[in-house]
Amino acid sequence: HDALLRAVKDSGYENATEVQAQAIPPALTGADLMVSSRTGSGKTASFILPALQQVLTARAERAAGNKTKTIGPRVLVLAPTRELAMQVAKSAMTYGRHIQGLRVATVLGGMPYAHQLRALSGHLDILIATPGRLLDHINSGRCKLENVTMFVLDEADRMLDMGFIDDINFVAEQIPATRQTLMYSATFAGNTGRLAAQLMKDPQRIDVSGHTETHENIEQRLHWADNGQHKRKLLEHILGERDVDQAVVFTSTQQDTEWLAEQLEAIGHRVAALHGGMPQGKRNRTLMALRRRDLRVLVATDVAARGIDVPTISHVINFGLPMKAEDYVHRIGRTGR
């Protein structure tokens, strides 16, 4: 649709990325897709653009005489974390900027209920949600999903790791079986593959994950530390280097983020912690401070690794190692873009 092409051009994109080139054409035909793609590959646009196209097609049909008033969203996107859901919502607004009266709502933990209820009432084009909070609204009767024509599961493996399998199955049961389902996951082995088999009809498989390829814009370095004190001194030394514009330091636990942020603040760094145990408002303010460059260092857990997209991050430091290789890839993908 012209409105989408204009928005893509406004964003400065001339060529589709590999995942977009492979996923958008079948998605536009209504096919179910199982997609693996690496962080920073442009996967969000690969489902948001077909989703917006569906919204526009439905509007054209209504204008041509099919006047049935729909309740609830036409497109439902499930994401594992608040940060990722907000990033998807931002993408929907960016690519939908020329669509008059586009209604995009987010339903997330940590957001005021009244605000979410207002967003859910009446007509809605796209709903982006984390599974737990969406379930609350379905059970209270506030969220109707009988008009969903496209169902997207973003980072499905991550949602299963976080224990959302029953929630996802329950949500899927509320959506018409005639829907289109798009599933994005780093792997389709084990539980993720079984979930895909349950939810999808004859899906096409698209794999552009290529985790073994070299990341041209990312140089990776390993520093050996003798003990905890040496490790901390190494961190202080690296953060003191002049070529560090902004850095994200990853730790293994929420407690470690708070402790390390305090240590770094004590020696004069403009630093803040970011983890899943913080209220949503505080998390938003911390990310805004990073974007405004009020902060030079962000100390974060893996929950914050997904959805942070700040172009001025020059260094990612793994102070605590992640549990999974996939989390490492997401962490280092915060830089080199």
Image (tube, helix red, strand yellow):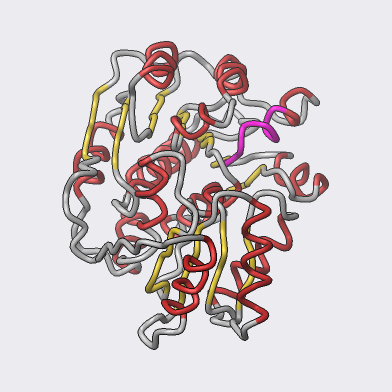
- Residue 332 part of the magenta-drawn span: no
Q: Quadrant where the C terminus lies? A: bottom left
Can you name the residue that lies furthest to the front here? 226
Give the quarter of the image for residue 27: top left
Q: Is residue 102 visible?
A: no
Give the quarter of the image for residue 244: bottom left
Q: Is residue 66 visible?
A: yes
Residue at the spot 62% in from the left edge and 66% down from the top edge: 260
Residue at the spot 71% in from the left edge and 50% down from the top edge: 277
Q: Tell how many labels.
A: 0
**Vertical placement of 32 versus 177: above or below?**
below
Residue 202: give x, y in percent of width and height.
Answer: 29, 14
In the rendered structure, the answer to whether residue 208 lies left or right of residue 54 reads left
**Vertical placement of 44 versus 334: above or below?**
above
Residue 61: give x, y in percent of width and height.
Answer: 44, 34
The residue lying toward the viewer, choosing from 54 and 183, is 183
Residue at the spot 30% in from the left edge and 24% down from the top edge: 31
- Residue 130 part of the magenta-drawn span: yes
**Vertical placement of 136 versus 196: above or below?**
below
Extent of the magenta region: 128-135
In the rendered structure, the answer to whether residue 130 lies left or right of residue 98 reads right
Residue 65: give x, y in percent of width and height.
Answer: 49, 32
Q: Main secondary structure of the magenta part?
A: helix
The residue lying toward the viewer, choosing from 303 and 185, is 303
Residue 33: give x, y in percent of width and height.
Answer: 31, 27
